[in-house]
Structures are given as structure tokens and as C-alpha cells.
Image (spheres, helix red, strand yellow):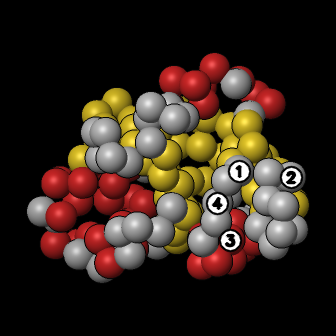
Amino acid sequence: MAYWLIKSEPDAWSWDQQVAKGAAGEAWSGVRNHTAKLNLMKMKKGDRAFFYHSNIGKEIVGIVQIVREHYPDPSDKTGVFVMVDVKALEPLPKPVTLAQIKATPALKNMALLKLSRLSVQPVTAGEWSAICRMGGLKR
């Protein structure tokens, strides 16, 4: 299993909206960056991703699972970009803020800090475990 982080502005698509979609999940569409697209194309069914509220809050609030691998994004008129479907698995009991991540030496190389504008990014197994612990999950 691979680990990821996906970003959403909570006033556009929030964790609560994702949870409300239930087991069917929701399409993660609208990505228009080629590096983020390549990351979407690497995602496999069953992979997990942190759900990050960007701009407002700047914190990891939950975990989603990839339930459908990449397919064409119909909102892209060029036919270049793709999307995946994700479903909410669980909230983090304690959201992990960007400030906490920046203050944690073990996370200093995290893509969230190095590629701050990238909306879909990989997370290493070590980073995943550290953030889960920081967020109050036993992993």
C-alpha cells in the first residue's frame, strides 16, 4: 500500500462533505497540475491518503481510501487530466497542523513542506506513522 496526501480548501470541499458521501465515496476531480496528475495515476485501489484542509485551517483532518483508480476527468476539456474516487475512512482525533509538521524534525523532508503548492503528493511510510501518532491514532 502506498500513502498520499490530498489537499482541499474546506470552503470548496470539506472533510464533512467527504464523510457525507459514505461508502460510495467521491471523485477527486479538478486537478490541473501535471505532477499531481502523475501522482493520481500512481494511486492504487486500497491506498490511503491524508485529507488536508488547505488555506483555511492548514491541517490534516482525516484519512481517505482510494476506491477507484484513475480515469479521465470529464471536467477537463483537453482530455489530459485524470481523477480517482476516494472514500472517508476515519477522522484524526486531533487534527495535525502545518505548524506541528514544520516543528517535527522527522517530517522535515515531507513533500507538504518541500512542494507546498502540490495538491496531490506522496507520503512515506515513516511520515504516515508519525502523523497518525501525532493525530491520536494507534498505528
Placement of 4 over or under 139, stated as above or below: below
- Please tell me the numbered disc located at residue 93: none
- Disc 4 vs disc 1: Cβ atoms closer than 8 Å? yes
Point out the residue furthest to the top here: 20
Q: Amino acid at mark 4?
A: Val
Q: Which residue is mark 4?
A: 31
Task: Kindly check if marks 3 and 4 are in contact, taking CB atoms under 8 A apart as contact.
Answer: yes
The residue type indicated by label 1 comes to: Ser
Query: x, y (%) of residue 43?
Result: 71, 66
Secondary structure of the residue carrying tag 4 is loop
Graded by Cα atoms within 10 Å as few (under 14), some (14 to 19) or many (20 or more), the crowding at tag 2 reads: some
Label 3: few (<14), some (14–19) or many (≥20) C-alpha neighbours in 10 Å = many
Which mark, by number, is residue 29? 1
The quadrant in which residue 128 appears is bottom left
Asked which secondary structure carries label 1, the reply is loop
Of the numbered discs in the image, which one, if any, rests on residue 37?
3
Query: Secondary structure beneath disc 2?
Result: loop
